[in-house]
Amino acid sequence: MVRVIFELRDGRCIECRGYIGESVMDVALDNGIPGIAARCGGAGHCTTCHAYVDAGWAAALDPPRADEREMLRGLRGRRPPSQLTRRLTCQIALHDGLDGIVVHTD
Ligand code: FES
C-alpha cells in the first residue's frame, strides 16, 4: 500500500493508505478527508477534488493532461504558494514512487 498524508487547512495531518492504481481522490473519499468533494466521481469534470502537492513530489507525478490543465485554469480562489502545485486528485494514480506523498487540501 501507498501512504498518502493529507495536510488540512487547519494544519492537521492525516495519514492514510491506498492501493496502487487507486487515485488520491479515492483515498480521500474512503477516509472522509474534508475539502475533497469529488462531485463528478473522478471523471475530471468538476475540480471539486483539487488539492496541492508539494513541489518535491511533483516530479514523481505524471504531468497533467491537457484536459486537467484546462480545468485547473478555470479554478478561482486561493492561489497556491510557489512550492505547491495544484492538481486534480482524481487524476493522480498511486504507485510505489508516491509512498508518503503530502497533499494539501483547500
Ligand atoms: S472528482 Fe471531479 S474533477 Fe476530480
Image (cartoon, rainbow, N blue to C red):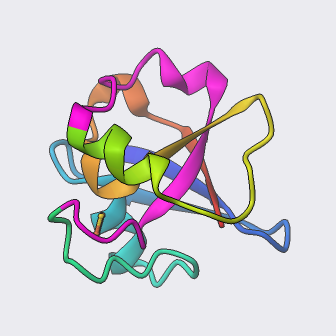
Residue 68 x, y percent position in the rendering: 30, 44
Q: Residue furthest top?
A: 59
Quadrant of res 97: top left
Report x, y in % for residue 69: 36, 39
Q: Position of residue 7 (x, y in %)?
A: 70, 59
Compare residues 70 and 48 and report the one nearer the observer. 70
Quadrant of the image where one finds ligand 1: bottom left
Magenta region, residue range: 44-66
Q: Where is residue 71 in the image (x, y as percent from the top left)?
A: 35, 53
| Left or right: where 61 falls relative to 14 | left
Quadrant of the frame with the C terminus: bottom right
Tag count = 0
Identity of the residue drawn at 52% across and 60% down: 75
In this view, 17 is above or below 42:
above
Q: Is residue 82 left or right of residue 18?
A: right
Q: Residue furthest right?
A: 11
In the picture provided, is 34 more to the left or to the right than 13?
Answer: left
Left or right of 10: which side holds 73?
left
Residue at image coords 20%, 53% = 22
